[in-house]
Image: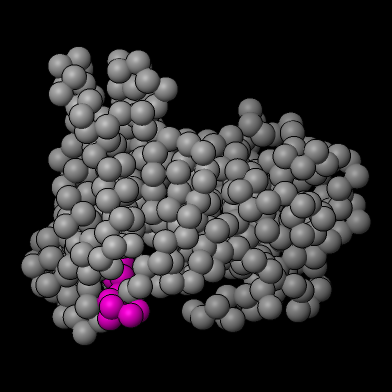
């Protein structure tokens, strides 16, 4: 589906529930993380970029103080009074249908962040359509949050900056959805830039735009979506966070960000093997992000391959968040000539990325498909992503 089609699908869906045609639309991108995995909630560094796949929201105001959301996923509208959101979030969130917690959670967080009175705020209908793959590690969740935050900020005349809108998205995800994720995805979605990545310090929320130069170097970033679904609200993600907190507390620091590779021998002496390996991943990954930024600036993108490969090995062996499908995709891409490759996103499924010469996209994609078939895995989806602009009102 193209961007125009996706925006039009959101408008059509809005029309079916409101009768209003050609309503204005806002949109926000998914993101891919070039490097820096599970570092965000450790106050560390990440280097994501917003991708060309976006979630669109068509928006109409209403006079009764209600908020109603509907998605092309199931076409079933979910409605609440704006004054009711406080009753459901965070404690009764389980009574709200899961997908609707993302946009409704953003509305709830934004009202609070802007100090708006829910009883006088303008009611709104939002219809969503998306071509960000869901659960693929490309952050469809941040995309729907970003589209909602951007649309509601404009509709309600809120003048919060982009960082505050990203924070509202994170609040929604943490408190309204119940997924204990960091702020990387929302920052990438809000701050995205054409041809560049966002180098983010997750402690200070300072962000710098880092030119990627993929196009000039004749490179493409290939996404290999394994189709293995993950969920942040359950499973290993929370466990990894707990290990990191344990490691930081054993080392007597506020967050693992405060450690460097020089601290690792002491860490190893103080902790059990599993906690130590979790800590080592985060500490070395932070260093790899810093190194990647430096290499991009000094040598250009063709020189970052080794850092991507080392990042994957660390996630596979130390953080233990890879799955056989991700390892197969990475190995097959590298064997077929990729400059670098790694799993991306929270892990336990989702997608891997490979940095490849433009001329090799087809060969490498089919090598990955062949390796999947040989291993008995369902065929992967492979496609290229390019760095794109952040959340905005559509033209
Ligand atoms: P990821 O962000 O990696 O794609 P998550 O589990 O974090 O995966 O978020 C995916 C969830 O976000 C979906 O299961 C759904 O609840 C919600 N979501 C994302 N995009 C949409 C959409 N366009 N319409 C409805 N729900 C969506
Ligand atoms: Mg997500």
Q: Quadrant of residue 76?
A: bottom right
Quarter of the image with the C terminus is bottom right
Along the horizontal axis of the image, is 220 left or right of 272? right
**Where's residue 56, x and y in %?**
61, 68
* x and y, in percent, of residue 246 in the image: 33, 20
Q: Position of residue 4 (x, y in %)?
A: 59, 81
* Depth order, front residue of 271/25: 271
Residue at x 48% of width, y 36% of height: 203
Q: Which residues are drawn in magenta?
A: 215-227
Q: From the top left corner, tell me how far across and down residue 280 is, in percent.
A: 22, 33
Q: Is residue 103 visible?
A: no
On whether residue 33 falls in the magenta region, the answer is no
Position of residue 111 relative to residue 143, above or below, is above
Q: Would residue 5 appear left or right of 200 to someone viewing this image? A: right
Closer to us: 383 or 267: 267
Question: Does residue 257 sit above or below 123 in this rendering?
Answer: above
- Residue at left offset 35%, top offset 79%: 215
Task: Please tell me whether residue 218 belongs to the stretch shown in magenta.
Answer: yes
- The answer to whether residue 40 is above or below residue 8 is above
At 55% from the left and 78% from the top, the residue drawn is 3
């Amino acid at each position: 589906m193209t961007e125009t089609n996706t925006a039009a699908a959101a408008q059509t869906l809005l029309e079916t529930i409101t009768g209003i045609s050609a309503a204005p639309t806002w949109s926000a991108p998914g993101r891919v993380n070039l490097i820096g995995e599970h570092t965000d909630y450790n106050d560390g560094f990440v280097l994501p970029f917003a991708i060309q796949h976006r979630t669109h929201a068509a928006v109409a105001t209403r006079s009764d103080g209600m908020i109603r959301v509907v998605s092309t996923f199931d076409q079933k509208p979910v409605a609440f009074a704006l004054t009711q959101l406080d009753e459901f979030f965070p404690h009764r969130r389980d009574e709200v249908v899961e997908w609707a917690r993302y946009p409704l959670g953003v509305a709830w967080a934004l009202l609070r962040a802007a100090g708006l009175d829910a009883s006088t705020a303008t009611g709104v209908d939002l219809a969503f359509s998306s071509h960000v793959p869901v659960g693929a590690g490309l952050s469809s969740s941040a995309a729907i949050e970003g589209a909602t935050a951007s649309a509601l900020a404009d509709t309600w005349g809120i003048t919060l900056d982009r960082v505050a809108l990203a924070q509202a998205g994170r609040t929604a995800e943490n408190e309204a959805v119940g997924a204990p994720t960091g702020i990387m995805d929302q920052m990438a979605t809000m701050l995205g830039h054409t041809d560049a990545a966002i180098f983010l310090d997750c402690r200070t929320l300072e962000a710098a735009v880092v030119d990627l130069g993929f196009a000039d170097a004749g490179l493409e970033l290939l996404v290999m979506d394994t189709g293995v679904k993950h969920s942040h609200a359950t499973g290993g993600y929370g466990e990894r966070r707990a290990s990191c907190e344990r490691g930081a507390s054993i080392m007597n620091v506020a967050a693992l960000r405060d450690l460097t590779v020089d601290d690792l021998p002491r860490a190893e002496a103080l902790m059990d093997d599993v906690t130590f390996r979790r800590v080592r991943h985060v500490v070395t990954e932070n260093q790899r992000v810093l190194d990647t930024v430096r290499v991009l600036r000094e040598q250009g993108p063709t020189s970052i391959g080794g850092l991507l490969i080392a990042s994957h090995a660390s996630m596979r062996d130390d953080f233990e968040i890879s799955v056989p499908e991700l390892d197969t995709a990475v190995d097959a891409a590298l064997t077929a000539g990729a400059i670098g490759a790694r799993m991306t996103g929270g892990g336990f499924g989702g997608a891997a990325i490979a940095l490849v010469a433009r001329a090799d996209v087809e060969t490498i994609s089919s090598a990955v498909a062949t390796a999947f078939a040989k291993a008995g895995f369902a065929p992967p989806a492979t496609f290229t992503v390019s760095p794109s602009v952040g959340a905005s009102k559509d033209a």
